[in-house]
Image: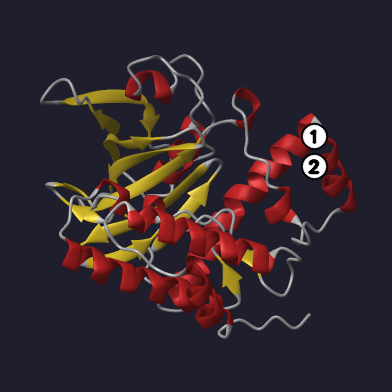
């Protein structure tokens, strides 16, 4: 069976011969075009086809249907598995060809497990850059799994490989759930979404975490419910010296982004309320 990609410009499936299941000792094939050259019209080759290949060979996905969203750090695709269920694949851009956000404030006191790698990350060597990205991606999957297992409204994690994280697709056959930042909603619905978002933030803090980038840009709106996304920068309150600073920033970002939807709030009152759910003891 061929792994196929749905060409968005034509109403048909295009065979993608590189993605052929191999039952024994699969080896990478270099004679075909990279996956990104099939998916991206601009010929951008910065996307990780090897991670998608492995997820395919593991039976997690059967085809890549289309791109949902492209950002500086990652591109998200809609995929299907053999049961024709829709999944979302977040494919991180190779750090060697892009400007990676300064993650020092998030990385402080994170467990790496190797002094050599930690030094390489701090010195920004090639090994350090590779390790930095691997840690960033692993941390997103780990936190996503943690939140999902504690009943936080997040997409269900499925698997990850290389620079690819595979998760539940939020949406249906007609399209993906929009970000709240892209929604045109009534004041009443916006107030409800704001309340849900504050409860999400409160529950994340109660679990000893700070999201680190919480705003309407990282909250999906689906069937009148808020669903949080984007977790590589999540910090653990007991480990990070920046926890209070990042919580204040999350509250500011959330309030500021909701103000564009017509919801106005008092950041200091919200901070005092939510910080009571955090265990600040070191």
Q: Which percent across, then down, holds residue 157?
A: 42, 61
Q: Which percent across, then down, holds residue 125?
A: 81, 32
Name the quarter where the C terminus is drawn: bottom right
122 displayed left or right of 68: right
Number of other residues with Cα within 10 Å of mark 1, as a class: few under 14, some 14 to 19, many 20 or more: some
Say which mark, if any, is on residue 121: 2
On the question of residue 201 being in view, the answer is yes
Look at the numbered discs 1 and 2 and tell me whether their residues touch, using CB distance below 8 Å: yes
Q: Which residue is mark 1?
A: 124
Residue 134 in the image: above or below residue 13: below
Residue lying at 54% horizontally and 31% vertically, measured from the top left: 27
Along the line of sight, the residue nearer the viewer: 101 or 185? 185
Residue at disc 1, secondary structure: loop
93 displayed left or right of 216: right
Say which mark, if any, is on residue 158: none
Q: Which percent across, then down, holds residue 77?
A: 33, 39
235 displayed left or right of 188: right
Residue lying at 60% horizontally and 57% vertically, measured from the top left: 139
Residue 6 in the image: above or below residue 276: above
Number of other residues with Cα within 10 Å of mark 2, as a class: few under 14, some 14 to 19, many 20 or more: some
């Amino acid at each position: 069976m061929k792994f196929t990609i749905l060409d968005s410009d034509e109403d048909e499936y295009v065979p993608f011969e590189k993605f052929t299941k191999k039952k024994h000792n699969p080896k990478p094939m270099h004679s075909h075009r990279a996956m990104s050259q099939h998916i991206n019209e601009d010929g951008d080759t910065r996307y990780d086809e090897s991670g998608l290949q492995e997820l395919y060979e593991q039976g997690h996905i059967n085809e890549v249907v289309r791109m949902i969203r492209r950002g500086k750090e990652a591109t998200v695709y809609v995929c299907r598995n053999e049961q024709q269920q829709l999944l979302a694949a977040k494919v991180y851009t190779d750090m060697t060809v892009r400007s990676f956000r300064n993650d020092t404030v998030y990385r402080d006191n994170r467990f790496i497990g190797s002094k050599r790698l930690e030094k390489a990350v701090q010195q920004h060597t090639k090994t350090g850059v590779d390790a930095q990205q691997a840690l960033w991606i692993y941390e997103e999957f780990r936190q996503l799994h943690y939140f999902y297992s504690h009943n936080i409204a997040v997409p269900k994690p499925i698997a990850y490989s290389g620079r690819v994280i595979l998760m539940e697709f939020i949406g249906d056959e007609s399209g993906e759930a929009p970000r709240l930042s892209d929604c045109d909603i009534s004041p009443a619905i916006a107030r409800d979404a704001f309340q849900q978002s504050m409860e999400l933030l409160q529950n994340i803090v109660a679990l000893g975490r700070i999201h680190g980038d919480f705003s309407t840009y990282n909250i999906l709106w689906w069937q009148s419910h808020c669903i949080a996304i984007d977790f590589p920068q999540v910090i653990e309150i007991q480990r990070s010296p920046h926890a209070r600073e990042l919580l204040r920033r999350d509250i500011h970002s959330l309030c500021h982004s909701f103000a564009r939807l017509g919801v106005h709030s008092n950041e200091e009152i919200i901070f005092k309320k939510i910080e009571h759910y955090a265990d600040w003891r070191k």
